[in-house]
Image (cartoon, rainbow, N blue to C red):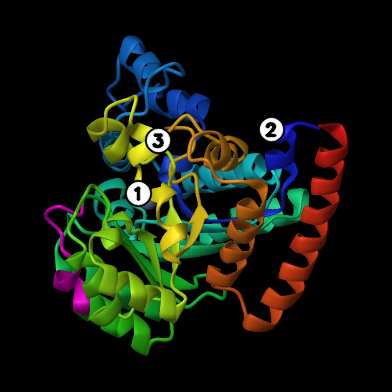
Amino acid sequence: MDLSEFCRRLPKVELHVHLLGAIRLNTLAEMAGRQGAGYSADEVAELARRDAEPKGVLHILRALEQRIMRGPEDLHRIAYEYLEDAASQGVRHAEIFWNPTGATRDTGIPYAAGADAILAAFDDAKHDHGISALLIPSIDREATPEEAAEMVGWMAAHRRDRIIGLGIDYRENDGPPEAFWKAYRAAKRAGFRLTAHAGEFGCHWRNIETAIDLLEVERIDHGYTVLDNPALVQRCVERGIVFTVVPTNSYYLRTLPPDRWALDHPIRRMPGAGLLIHPNTDDPPLHRIDPERCWRMMVEDFGFDLDDLRRFMLNGILGAFIPEDDKRGLAATFAAEYDRLRAELDTAT
Ligand SMILES: [Zn+2]
């Protein structure tokens, strides 16, 4: 047993992963290569190039919505394959973002048909691989606030048990959280759990504050710039807000010098400030990462130790949108498994 195997077998939840960003690269190539998508063979190869650096992935997500995907069966395949891969890496439970606005407007998949295809994949993956999953429809903040409110209307009109909450993603720079307060208010009234991407791409801490105070979210996705405001950090600590962080976040890969990247990355300072963080893969194949490497990066790149990983593991359960009663049992199971794995690792090293 080495650190890789430890991180792979570590029982984990994933709270921050985007359905389209979780597409296997060979599936992406296969779908993009279909007649009608309009890609040349070279372009298909480029899309799925394995050795490429993780660059901005938003244009690939948009291409999937606008050109590459065809129908609900594509959503089913992407969801099932992600869950199969995640389960093989020790992920026991995943909460997955999906953008119904683009699916409906650009791909032509109506909300209920798309959601039901994804939920059917959840059933199949649970049956075949034992992994559980919840779906979080997510606002496309590059679309209008009215489209966001319309999407929440679909969620309320087509209730499904495992459609648990509302998120928001895509480019934060021109889509501040306050623009979407109506959608969040309606989702809360309808009983959905709430989370939001905020403080990604170096965006101001104000977006995190707004997400908490105006949108009333329960957890924050990314949230790195919270560190720029110690009083806000303190409030997040007191409220026990879980931050779903992404070690491969492309903004810091792009903006920090390679020799300082891991040293200056805010993830490194968040736990020391008292914040509850939980590492996630975000868009795993597109970021050239998987859960094992994601957790290993927390040790090898960001300098955390194995006791920290145990805390991060339990933070994931704390932040999950599962019933409170289930959390206690799951935490006990995960902790016992962690301790067994740790003993094996300690014996081996
Ligand atoms: Zn994300």
Q: Residue at x 73, y 69 (%)?
A: 330
Q: Is residue 98 left or right of residue 179?
A: right
Counting from the top left corner in percent of width and height, residue 65 is at: 31, 43
- In the image, is 119 to the left or to the right of 204? right
Quarter of the image where one finds residue 188: bottom left
Earlier along the polypeptide chain: callout 2 or callout 3? 2
Residue 52 vertical position relative to residue 308 in the rendered view, above or below: above
Q: Within 10 angstroms of label 3, few (less than 14), some, or many (20 or more) residues?
A: many
- Disc 2: which residue: 4
Ligand 1 is within 8 Å of the C-beta of the residue at disc 2: no
Residue 65 position (above or below residue 243): above
Q: Secondary structure at mark 1?
A: helix
Residue 266's mark?
Answer: 1
Looking at the rendered structure, the kind of residue marked 3 is: Ala
Mark 3 lies on residue? 262
- Of badges 2 and 3, the one in the foreground is 3
Q: Residues within 10 Å of mark 2 (few under 14, many from 20)?
A: few
Reply above or below: 39 against 179.
above
Residue for point 42% across, 32% down: 286
> Closer to the camera, 177 or 318?
318
CA–CA distance in space, label 1 to label 2: 24 Å
Q: Is the residue marked 1 within 8 Å of ligand 1, measured from its CB?
A: no
Q: Residue furthest top?
A: 42
Residue 280, percent across and down? 50, 49
Residue drawn at x 62%, y 38% is 292
Magenta stretch?
A: 172-181
